Image (cartoon, rainbow, N blue to C red):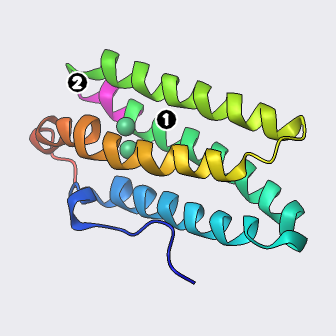
Amino acid sequence: MKEFVKWNKKYELGFKEIDSQHKKLLEFLNEAHELISKKDKKDEANDLVEELISFVRVHFGTEEKYFREFNYYGAGAHIAEHNRITLKVLRVYDEIKKGDDAYLDLLNLLKDWFDEHCTTYDKDYVKCFKEHGLK
Ligand SMILES: [Fe+2]
Ligand SMILES: [Fe+2]
């Protein structure tokens, strides 16, 4: 089966922990995408989507922890952006819980968001994190 999302060199920020979280996020998306395309796997898909959502929040927590540690000037706008997508995702997930088959919408939302966010907002903190010695 064709991969839903693919890791791309442009996503590489050069920080071990953050890059591996980003990779894991894409793996989650691929795995969830494969499950939702199989009719008999809906329960598993649901569990995985829940795991995916909590992983996204863990990842935001990691970045935001460094924002505080390094006194990152762009923290405010970046955190607002994290909150905006979190709310959006939770809203779609709410529809799913009410019975709407919106899994694909949720995965597409995160896929498009990641491509945009990682190459803009996340790229923007690279200089600051490097200056503070993060590897
Ligand atoms: Fe990120
Ligand atoms: Fe971010």
User: Rounded to the nearest whole Å, what is the CA distance between mark 1 and mark 2?
Assistant: 14 Å
Q: Point out the residue furthest to the bottom here.
A: 1
Local secondary structure at mark 2: loop
First reached walking from the N terminus: tag 1 or tag 2: 1
Q: Which residue is mark 2?
A: 72
In reply to whether residue 57 is colored magenta, the answer given is no
Q: Tag 2: Cα neighbours inside 10 Å, few (<14), some, or many (≥20)? A: some
Label 1–label 2 contact, CB within 8 A? no
| Residue at the far top in the pictured view | 76
- The quarter holding residue 125 reads top left
Identify the residue shown where x is 23% and y is 28%.
70
Look at 49% across and 35% down and name the residue there.
61
Above or below residue 26? Residue 82 is above
Q: Is residue 130 above or below residue 95?
A: below
Circle 1 residues within 10 Å: few <14, some 14–19, many ≥20: some
Q: Which residues are magenta?
A: 65-70
Q: Is mark 2 within 8 Å of ligand 2?
A: no
Q: Position of residue 97 (x, y in %)?
A: 86, 38
Quarter containing the N terminus:
bottom right
Residue 16: % across, % down? 31, 61
> Residue at image x 73%, y 69%?
37
> Which residue occupies the foreground of this view, 17 or 87?
87
In the rendered view, tell whether residue 6 sits above or below residue 105: below
Q: State which quadrant residue 5 falls in.
A: bottom left
Q: Give the amino acid type for the residue marked by disc 2 in the picture.
A: Tyr
Q: Report the amino acid beneath label 1.
A: Gly
Disc 1, ligand 2: is the CB inside 8 Å?
Answer: no
Locate the C terminus by quadrant: bottom left
The residue that disc 1 covers is: 61
Above or below residue 54? Residue 92 is above
- Is 34 or 118 nearer to us in this picture? 34
Residue ID at (79%, 31%): 94
